[in-house]
Image: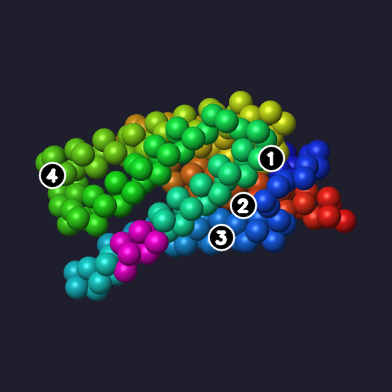
Amino acid sequence: MELLDAAPVHRLPGWSARQLRVLGWLALVSVVANAMVVGLTFAGALLEADEAELLFTYTDWLSLVLALLGCYLLLRFKAFAEVRFFARNLSVPIWLLLAVTLLLEAVDMLFSDQLFAGLDWQTIGYMALLCLMGICTTWLGIRLLKLQGPYPALKVMAWLDIVGGLMLASVLLMLVALLPLLGAGVALMLVFFKGAAELQETAG
């Protein structure tokens, strides 16, 4: 499927092609950096205890920065979708997803050493938040499918959110869920670039 098929050109008040291109590049940075964090996390298992602890400290802070970047991109996407696709039903799942994301990062920073060491309340709470994040992601994907006249990349993003969200909600498949969710990040990048291309055509 061609992800950058032509779509009707619209004027987007308050948006410029440059803004959307910057958001597209930030989405790409987010995908690459998140994939790197996953790789470093697995690599940490091969290191000595002291080296692994230092590596995990860096990855924890990097994960926090990436979570904040992801929240920012999601808010900008919401604003763009409201103007470009007249979306009026994305607020609740997006704001819930942002809240759960920040809660997960807070729990991870506070109890990282204790998580998954046993079936204690910290681990159960963390798993419950992961499940809730999956539900919110799936809900967002369903809402995206209902948008009128979306870009092909936006449809792909919606389905990847649904698949990744369901996997995340299962908790057991949370590691596998990283693949479709990273794919959704790539699709988000294409959505921003498509919007930039439309505005460039309109300006021309």
Q: Secondary structure at mark 1?
A: helix
Q: CA distance from mark 2 to mark 3?
A: 8 Å
Q: Nearer the viewer, mark 3 or mark 4?
A: 3
Q: Which residue is mark 4?
A: 118
Which of the two discs, 1 and 3, labels the residue nearer the N terminus? 3
Q: Which residue is mark 2?
A: 189
Amino acid at pointer 2 = Met
Which of the two discs, 2 and 3, labels the residue nearer the N terminus? 3
Q: Nearer the viewer, mark 4 or mark 2?
A: 2
Asked whether 30 or 167 is in front, the reply is 30
- Rendered location of residue 87, percent (x, y): 61, 33
Which of the two discs, 4 and 2, labels the residue nearer the N terminus? 4
- Rendered location of residue 180, percent (x, y): 50, 42
Q: CA distance from mark 4 to mark 2?
A: 38 Å
The quadrant where residue 24 appears: bottom right
Q: Residue at x 83, y 55 (%)?
A: 203
Label 1 crowding class (10 Å Cα cut-off): few <14, some 14-19, many 20+?
some
Q: Secondary structure at mark 3?
A: helix
Amino acid at pointer 3 = Leu
The quadrant where residue 8 appears: top right
The quadrant in which the C terminus is found is bottom right
